[in-house]
Image (cartoon, rainbow, N blue to C red):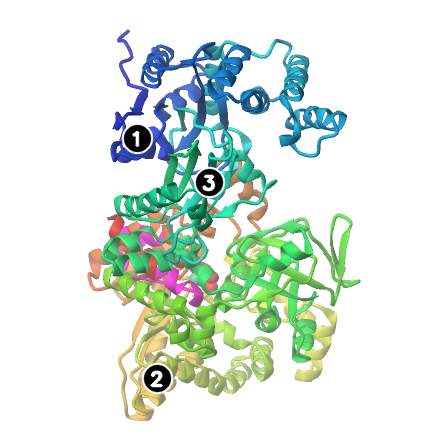
Amino acid sequence: MSKDVTKYVYFFGEGKAEGSASMKDLLGGKGANLADMTSIGLPVPPGFTISTEACAYYSANDSTYPEGLREEVLKHLDHLEKVMGAKLGDSENPLLVSVRSGAAQSMPGMMDTVLNLGMNPDSAKALAKKTNNERFAWDSYRRFMQMFGDVVMGVPHHEFEEALQSVKTERNCEFDTDLDVEDMKEVIDRYRALYKRYIGEDFPTDPIDQLFKAINAVFGSWNNDRAIRYRQMNDIRGLLGTAVNVQSMVFGNMGATSGTGVAFTRDPSTGEDKFYGEYLMNAQGEDVVAGIRTPQTIDTLKSVNEKVYQQLVDIRDLLEKHYKDMQDIEFTIQEGTLYMLQTRNGKRTIFSWLRSQVEMVESGLISKETAVGRVPAGEFNKLFAPVLDSDDIDKQGVQEVTKGLNASPGGACGQVYFSAEKAEEMAALGKDVILARVETSPEDIGGMAVAKGVITTRGGMTSHAAVVARGMGCPCVSGAGDISINYKDGSMKVGDKVVREGDFISIDGFTGQVYFAHIQVKPSEIVQVLNGEMKSDESLLFQNYNKFMGYVDEIRKLRVRTNADTPADTHMAVQLGAEGIGLCRTEHMFFGGQRIISVRKMILANNKVEREKALAELLPMQRQDFEEIFTELNGLPATVRLLDPPLHEFLPNDHTSRHEMALQLGISVEEIAQKTTQLHEFNPMLGFRGCRLAIVYPEILHMQVRAIIEAALNVSEKGTEVHPEIMIPLVGHYKEFEYTKKHAIETIEKVFAERGKKIAYKIGTMIEVPRAAITADEIAKSAEFFSFGTNDLTQMTCGFSRDDAASFLGPYVNDTDKQFYEYDPFATIDIDGVGKLVKIASELGRSVNPKIKLGICGEHGGDPKTIDFCQKVGLDYVSCSPFRVPVARLAAAQAVLKK
Ligand code: PEP
Ligand code: MG
């Protein structure tokens, strides 16, 4: 067998380093930047980094080391001891080290860290002598025992706390700092006994033993539950593991001239270009985090130690110039000398992202491409949604009662109602309402439109509630399965917590959290400007947003359209940068007032004549809808889809509503019940819907096409350009398309003849049935565009019902032993399956019709990872709900940069 010659350990110290900033994958972010800071001359305590490859080996090989690793660590320790002139665990001149985790992407607090390693009774005595500070030495030993016992060996943290507290109580001490040397030694004795009781052996005094146990603990912590969950939640994938940084300790708790702190080179919440941070004198890192003492703001350090303050200010400048991004740093001052312990790109809010990147572009520090490439697209929608006020949550001390899917972003608070009618009634009285339903259907649209937020207990990311709420920019939590709703007595509960109709609840559509409490909501500033409620020159955020979107649009190639079916949504989408409508779902225009009555007449019609009569009532209403939308679009194209859902969705399903309908139409309840039964399908999503409706009842198509073309002519006569595109849904066979297209053209020609005028139009289809995708060359011969309806295409390709797959998709995506799908396939396209069909259909389509226009209009059209895929496949545009338009623009630009 050949000998393993891989290098696993990299030294840094004395101005030289074996690693560099570009080695993040191998050395982790912390290790690579420690090496880098050392090389650029910053004061970094020397140490070495064990690579992520070693961790990967350890994880994959039953917690064993690759050949030679132990020797390599010992060799580097030896070198470190020489550089420091001190020895680990020595009774004369002891070296102490920290052992810290650090993966390629930062996972703050998720993995293990051990400080003060190398402490034992001998080194504690030596440290006391050396520092002339006995209390400090024994306190350091105590801290080490506690950390090592807890983090490395798993002795419960509270046991240590209780042992410490017992000594404090016996000695009448309030604070740790009141304990003297003898008290500290007593604490140490109790810790020792505690350790032995739990672990069954003595606390290790051999520093080499301590070191390897700590390294193993850090390697092992890569796969602790917390770390796994964090990676899942933050979509951190494909990393080898964590690196381990062994670094000589510096002490911030050596007295009044020592201290420790954390700082950001810019404000992480607003992005303002000012030094922002906190420090504590006479403290170690965990004291700052634990919040027992209140840290001071960084500017006050000037009066404590002006030299160190100035040095930090200079380092701040240098680091930003070096890394060309906002940094988050950790430092320690040991007896008046500054040491840098960490630098990394700072985590920040989306507001801070925008401001910091725009200001860096304007100051010439970075290019527009760099700025656009960095801003997290997944966070972008937070700019537009109202938010639950976190100060209010803290002030009230409220807790979430449950968590569902974060289906549509935004915070909402209101009185809960369990039916759309009741929600509408209460909203009309001026109340803020939250609509809670087991699931929603098109019937609920009125209630959803007036609701501040929507909750469903069933349904995933493309369930009706999720799709419609996103389209409306209405916060929504879907699939909150722990909630049970009782429609009869008007209540819902989670465990023993109950709210009744009219009680206040709050939801957070960013996170899926549900609160049974009244929480304040703050509106988005950008939306206030777009709505004209705030002047743009009063909003720095809006100005930065505008500049940033300017950079985005210079880079992107994909066009971005919107899914909109009302003039208001269209208006907002255009304000947000939409370049047309990619999907106008006409069925959404079939609800409310007289419309639904006419639609129901059409459905109940016994023959063509009756049906045409009902359709004639609908025609002017549809025409007017289109006129308003075309006017809003002001020359941008509009893809209008003909009626798609199964007809039963337009009929009421409860007794009271059926009664009302019977009265309205002058028919019997039985007649309605009979028709409903007749329309009942076991699997309506695969049933009588889409183009099948237009094929069996061409008169529906005739009415809709006439409405579209007449509206287009009317609007263009008034001087506004109109580009109508008629889209046939759910085509599976090219003959279905050709049949419906022929009918559409006949109607169009009739209208042209009547009006003595023509207008350019296009006719195309959705590709949402797998058969259509694999026979796309046949369809493309007569279709002018394809729009991939990836909601249905996913449903039919994977065989997952889009309305209730959530029950098993959770485990399919999240459970570590499953993860059959990398992401929820209804949110991010399943590239290998559904994506393959999109690619095949695009290639087939273009092979016979090179000019065919290709787009996507399923919910995936607003998802950054899917947009990256669309760019690769070469689609012309993506279409998404209005508030996702800016995200899609950004993701489209990032897709170009990635390429
Ligand atoms: C789709 O199926 O992807 C689509 C856009 O149509 P709908 O969601 O209306 O079925
Ligand atoms: Mg569809």
Confirm or deny contact between disc 2 and disc 1 (CB under 8 A): no
Look at mark 3 in the image and give the residue it sits on: 261
In front: label 1 or label 3: 3
Q: Quadrant of ligand 1?
A: bottom left
Q: Is residue 353 visible?
A: yes
Q: Residues within 10 Å of mark 1 (few under 14, many from 20)?
A: many
Q: Is residue 723 left or right of residue 531?
A: left
Q: Which residues are magenta?
A: 866-888
Identify the image quadrant of residue 537: bottom left
Q: Position of residue 620 (x, y in %)?
A: 47, 87
Lower sequence index among marks 2 and 3: 3
Could you say whether the residue bearing mark 3 is in a helix, strand or loop? strand
Q: Amino acid at mark 1?
A: Ala
Residue highlighted by disc 2? 712
Front one among 186 and 233? 186
Q: Residue at x 35, y 65 (%)?
A: 544
Residue 499: x and y in percent read 75, 59
The residues tagged by marks 2 and 3 sit, at their Cα atoms, a distance apart of 65 Å
Q: Can residue 882 be found in the magenta stretch?
A: yes
